[in-house]
Amino acid sequence: MAKAPVLTPQAEDFPRWYQDVINKAELADNGPVRGTMVIRPYGYGLWERMQQELDARIKATGTRNAYFPLFIPQSYLAKEAEHVEGFAPELAVVTHGGGKQLEEPAVVRPTSEMIINASFAKWVQSYRDLPLLINQWANVVRWEMRPRVFLRTTEFLWQEGHTAHATYEEARDFAARIHRDIYADFMVNVLAIDVVLGRKSPSERFAGAINTLTLEGMMGDGKALQMGTSHELGQNFARAFDTRFLSKDGSRELVWQTSWGSSTRMVGGLIMSHGDDNGLRVPPRLAPTQVVVLAIKDDEAVLAKVREIGAALTAAGIRTEVDDRTDTPFGRRAVDWELKGVPVRVEVGPRDLEAGTAMLARRIPGGKEPVAIDALPARLPGVLDEDQALLLRQSRERREARTTDVRTIEDAVAAATAGGWARIPWADLGPEGEARLAQDAVTVRCLVGEDGSVPESDDAPGTLAVVGRAY
């Protein structure tokens, strides 16, 4: 194991540890305007991999990518009262442009329901135009009062999907499909975070939605992080923009809509879910670099061999990087790669070369072992699969061990304060109990069934509220 980098221990100060990892793994910096961030190449590489994995899944539903304007006429927001009220404190408004006061102020998009519905109203004419399935990868701006890099920033990157359907049932089912088959599949099987799928309580719903589905992950300190949401918008925005279609029977009907999004917040979730006192641990299926091959010394034969190994692993379909920077001390390079959480290091020096072996260093479970160089292309895929499974298992075990079933508000607060989650019958809690929890900075993260399913309604029998403190 390489020498541990100088990070604040998690147990001593988790928020400080988080910031240390971001800085020393070179993921991001604070931007010049308060609340903004500069995403550095390694951090952006993680986001690009998330984009690639999610984009392929989204397109498999028949959804197509498009792009919509950054600026929204202020009058558009006034069309849906609940929506504008929900976002009013976070809006950035442009009042001047080109040296002149604008005739109508423009809002920098906090989300795109309004600007997209202006287009949907033009594009949808007949039932033959439905379903209309659109996604965009973009930036949004929400004026954040308590910024934290990746978790809450004034400007962040995300994808937002928007769809229009002929019936309520089609829209409901599509929102559930995104929630279950796209987001949950990605978060569990790629990010290796054992998220809880649930339904938001009425007070936590997206502004303007009739239902919000959420995915909640437990971080290393026991707090919750909302990893993504999928909303049933009903006909609220369709009514505001008069988005109607000619049905098969010749009547003019309002469409039913969904919207759904996930953001660079997932990078923060990745750090806090899997990181340890040595830095990041990146799940192999996500990792931009799955294996790094390091030359220990400036030796011609060693350098030739590490490049040969790198080519062989790349040909085997493994995302591989060769580190032959022998002008930088080996120990420093090994620590840097460990800090960045690259799953596997293959280390080669003159003695290894003589023995026909390389030292295999595994970041996720830890430990080193010699492996025959010729065996690496066949051996490493199994190693990466094992380590992917280990991270998911650790995520699940942490959540299960730190979730307590309770019957009283006091016990729910105690569980959350101790660094975990509580599950309490929603019928025993209700909106009044939810308000009481808020006094102790505890929130209802989601509503779930006793069997872990997503309830079909807020008052479905046996519904439990998952509560905890959150980022």
Image: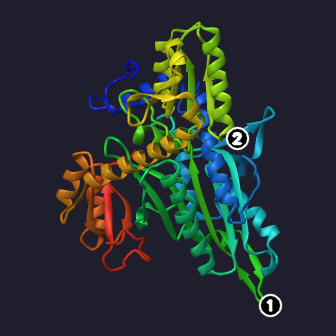
Using the rendered view, name the quadrant where residue 49 is placed. Answer: top right
- Label 2 element class: strand
Q: Is residue 221 above or below residue 135?
A: above
Q: Position of residue 446 (x, y in %)?
A: 39, 62
Q: Are marks 2 and 1 in contact (CB under 8 Å)?
A: no
**Secondary structure beneath disc 1?**
loop
Disc 2: CA contacts within 10 A as few (<14), some (14-19) or many (>=20): few
Mark 2 vs mark 1: in front? 1
Does the image show residue 417?
Answer: yes
Horizontal and vertical percent for residue 188?
48, 54
Give left or right: position of 266 versus 67.
Answer: left
**As rendered, which of 11 and 417 lies closer to the eye?**
11
The percent coordinates of residue 240 (x first, y second) are 67, 69
Q: Which residue is at 58% across, 27% downward?
A: 31
Identify which residue is drawn at 62% across, 34% down: 44
Q: Position of residue 149 (x, y in %)?
A: 50, 34
In which quadrant of the rendered image does the C terminus lie? top left
Q: Which residue is mark 1?
A: 250
Nearest the eye: 371 or 127: 371
User: Which amino acid type is shown beneath numbered disc 1?
Assistant: Gly
Judged from this view, the residue extending furthest toward the bottom is 249
- Residue sitting at x 55%, y 34%: 375
Question: Considering only vertical position in the picture, is 72 above or below 61?
Answer: above
- Circle 2: residue type: Thr
Q: Is residue 328 left or right of 443 when viewed as pictured?
A: right
- Of the image marks 2 and 1, the number of the one nearer the N terminus: 2
Q: Tell me the residue that label 2 is attached to.
A: 95
Q: Which scheme is used to colour this image of the protein?
A: rainbow
Residue that extends furthest to the front in the rendered view of this protein: 355
Disc 1 crowd rating (10 Å Cα; few below 14, some 14-19, many 20+) is few
Quadrant including the N terminus: top left
* The image quarter in which residue 84 lies: bottom right
